[in-house]
Image: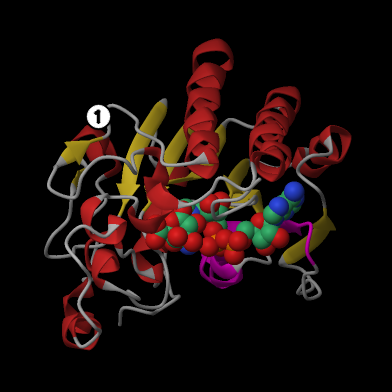
Amino acid sequence: MPASTSSGAFPGPRLERLLLTGAAGGLGKVLRESLRPFANVLRLSDVAALTPALAGHEEVVSCDLADKAAVDALVADCDAIVHLGGVSVERPFEEVLEANIKGIFHIYEGARRHGVKRVVFASSNHVIGFHKQSEHIDAHALRRPDGYYGLSKSFGEDVAQFYFDRWGIETVSIRIGSSFPEPANRRMMSTWLSYRDLTTLIGKSLFTPGVQHTVVYGVSANRDVWWDNTAAALLEFMPQDTSEVFRDKVEAQPPVAPTDPSAVYQGGAFTAQGPFE
Ligand code: NAI
Ligand code: 15L
């Protein structure tokens, strides 16, 4: 059931109010459904339009992450934050600056001011994108961002560490591989994360005690994974899905040259994007 959005019968604790930023996006639409067992009320936010809230279970709050006062109001009364909002691909620095760099600062300032003690940050494999696909790395490997977008996620991880060290706000930074209904190409055979495994990992990230700032790779149980999650063992994340079920379909695609960035670097084509002038 690789494309499932269900988290199953979640037996764990429930939050009163969970903020989900980026709720109108690809993952946000999925998690709007699958995170429902984790909280009595999901506060859904995006700068893009959202479909109306389900009475009793959801609240919709429109917000631009670049607007500090608006983010401060957005975070008020929430028990935890799943932060997905922002630019999600390589774009000119000025765009990334507003949504991702200012955005994550505003989220943590809101958390500090309103006493929110747990954040789940959608980081990305593009923090380590310039590592070669021949390498096997863990969460302590040198960060090698592959663009402005990857740099912003690297900054986000530093902000998370700082707000733990200074203010005790705990974060799990999930370096998501490629979370889509199915892997779209050969690289994603290694990086794919099913929606079901993503939901499970977010649940672990919200409710595991004592995470401080933990970095974890968000990847399913694929055959050829480049990432070692030993450093995040306390989360006890055991992915259930694998890209193997899509192998025949993906390998029917035309071959890629061995020198193509998508076949060389963990970050794939992102390593060759820009400049944008
Ligand atoms: P997406 O681009 O579909 O969703 C991002 C959402 O953020 C959009 O709905 C957009 O309107 C919103 N947003 C952008 N700028 C904003 C701003 N200034 N204020 C408020 N909202 C703003 O991306 P997707 O795929 O859903 O990813 C969600 C998160 O997970 C992103 O942070 C992305 O970087 C991260 N991620 C996703 C991966 C994937 O494979 N889907 C892989 C690695 C990381
Ligand atoms: C990401 O960080 C992006 O948000 C997503 O759209 C994919 O490109 C993914 O990485 C990937 O590397 O496949």
Q: Is residue 246 left or right of residue 67?
A: left
Residue 251 higher or lower than 153, as above or below: below
Q: Ligand 1: which quarter? A: bottom right
Q: Position of residue 192 (x, y in %)?
A: 31, 65
Residue 41 shows in this picture: no
Asked whether residue 30 is drawn in magenta, I would say yes
Q: Position of residue 257 (x, y in %)?
A: 20, 67
Asked whether residue 150 is drawn in magenta, I would say no
Pick the residue in front: 236 or 27: 27
Which residue is pictured at 37% across the width and 47% down the height? 125
**Considering the numbered disc 1 on the image, is that residue within a helix, a strand or a loop?**
loop
Q: Is residue 154 left or right of residue 129?
A: right
Which residue is pictured at 20% across the width and 88% down the height? 252
Quarter of the image for the N terminus: give it: bottom left
Instruction: Find the residue positioned furthest to the front.
Output: 277
Q: Is residue 197 left or right of residue 32?
A: left
Span of residues in magenta: 26-48
Residue 76 shows in this picture: yes
Which residue is pictured at 40% across the width and 39% down the height? 127
Quarter of the image for the C terminus: give it: top right
Q: Which residue is mark 1?
A: 141
